[in-house]
Image (tube, grey):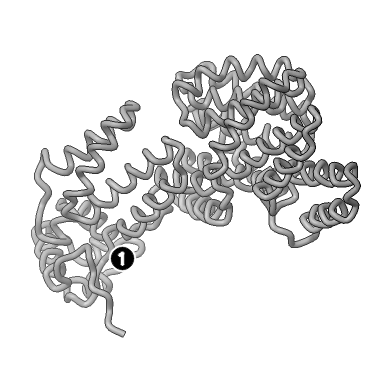
Amino acid sequence: MPRRKSTHVDDPAAVGRRLRDARDRAGISQRQLSFEGCSPAYISRIEAGERIPSLQLLREMGRRLGVSEDYLATGLEREAGGEDRKLLDAEVSLRLGEVEEAFHLYTEVLEAAATTSVRARALAGLGQIAFERGEPRRAIDLLEQAVRVSHTEISDQPALADTLGRAYAIVDDFEPAMRIFRHSLAAAEERKDTVESIRFGVLLANAYIDSNELEAADALLQKTVALAPNASDPIFRARIFWSQSRLYAMREDATTAARYARKALELLELTEHTHYAARAHHLLAHVELDRGNAGEALDLIDRGLPLIEASGNRAELAVFRLERARALVQLDRKEEAGALAIESAELLADVAPHDAGRGYALIGEILEAVGDTAGARKRYEQAVELLAPGPSRYVLDAYSKLATLHEAEGRSDEALTVLKKAMALQAPGAGVASS
């Protein structure tokens, strides 16, 4: 089968000549140029035009020889003030929160991209923007394109791996999320990069929690906690406290969960990271609701809501409002809660199915309380469709309420069918979903 033509170099023989010339000018032997993953023998075969190196290898060889990867790949240097400058402007705009400006700049760069490396960076930037806009499926598509175009392992691109893994987790696709986080964690540990090890340790632990793999999450968090004292950034320590809170909440130890959530919140309130502070308010409110403290939870939500409005996207705002609806139900403000829950669930249905399922279950509970059993049954059915598969307490609770409703209306067969489905989720080997 013929080898597929490479898209990131002009000609293998020309690449070999440029590499040899650059090495000769630098006075470096093939052995001196070699590094892990690129032996002297491999360099010899590149120079002979027998092998096409990846952009990652070209980048590292160029760095050692004082030339750019673009020169080695195509013989052309990018002009200062051209694509590089526009990419830099786009990246700065995105960091400053000027999302629309960044979007236009990245789009212009992508349309005019002359090299695969520029195209990959533009796609990655647009993927990050899609993620921040609350469009995780669009983000996945763009970021996966960026990975393919870059010809670089995703574990060597921490920022991209972080966003892509979280996008998969948001849409409840945990297998690729965990694979990305595992590879990135292993690469960070191999580099002895403490900061990135903490980052991906926490991300992987949260994916384990979402997948109901609590023992794996616990072991990983303990390992990650051991690194935390060496990290001066309060965000890293807060992330660990946050993950520990979620883990204890899953184990129905609400008191310990609340303690860790408060630690995270205290750290974040000392920083300017309003987005993380907002999410910490949400987490603690969730824990307080599980403890039956609706008034305190509502106060936390109302304090965090302006923060998420300033720094979050529509989907994150919808999750916040869903938690507010839960608090209002406990405070017997059901009409207000119902309107909030419906608005939130409909927005989240495609973006975050698990959270949407929780919303529909809450709407069902409200409708049942006011005597609308047909409406309640419809919402419970929507809830289990989105929450399953997986033995989370939310899907099991929704199945239980649906079965009780069928039984109360004299449909014993339907009630039994629903209970069998709930039992099947708890059987060994059943799939898991976020909890």
Left/right of residue 428 with respect to residue 42 in the rendered view? right
Q: Position of residue 84 (x, y in %)?
A: 18, 42
Q: Position of residue 46 (x, y in %)?
A: 21, 71
Dividing the picture into quadrants, the one containing residue 266 is top right
Could you tell me if residue 190 is visible in this image? yes
Q: Nearer the viewer, residue 422 or 334?
A: 334
User: Mark 1 is on which residue type?
Assistant: Cys
Give the answer, above or below, for where 337 lies relative to 75. above
Give the answer, above or below, for where 154 lies relative to 310. below
Secondary structure of the residue carrying tag 1 is: loop
Q: Nearer the viewer, residue 430 or 154?
A: 430
Residue sticking out furthest to the bottom? 1
Dividing the picture into quadrants, the one containing residue 102 is top left
- Total numbered badges shown on the rendered structure: 1
Give the answer, above or below, for where 74 lies relative to 351. below
Q: Position of residue 301 (x, y in %)?
A: 62, 20
Q: Dividing the image into 4 quarters, which one contains the C terminus?
A: top right
Left/right of residue 370 with respect to residue 11 in the rendered view? right
Q: Position of residue 372 (x, y in %)?
A: 77, 33
Residue at which label 1 appears: 38
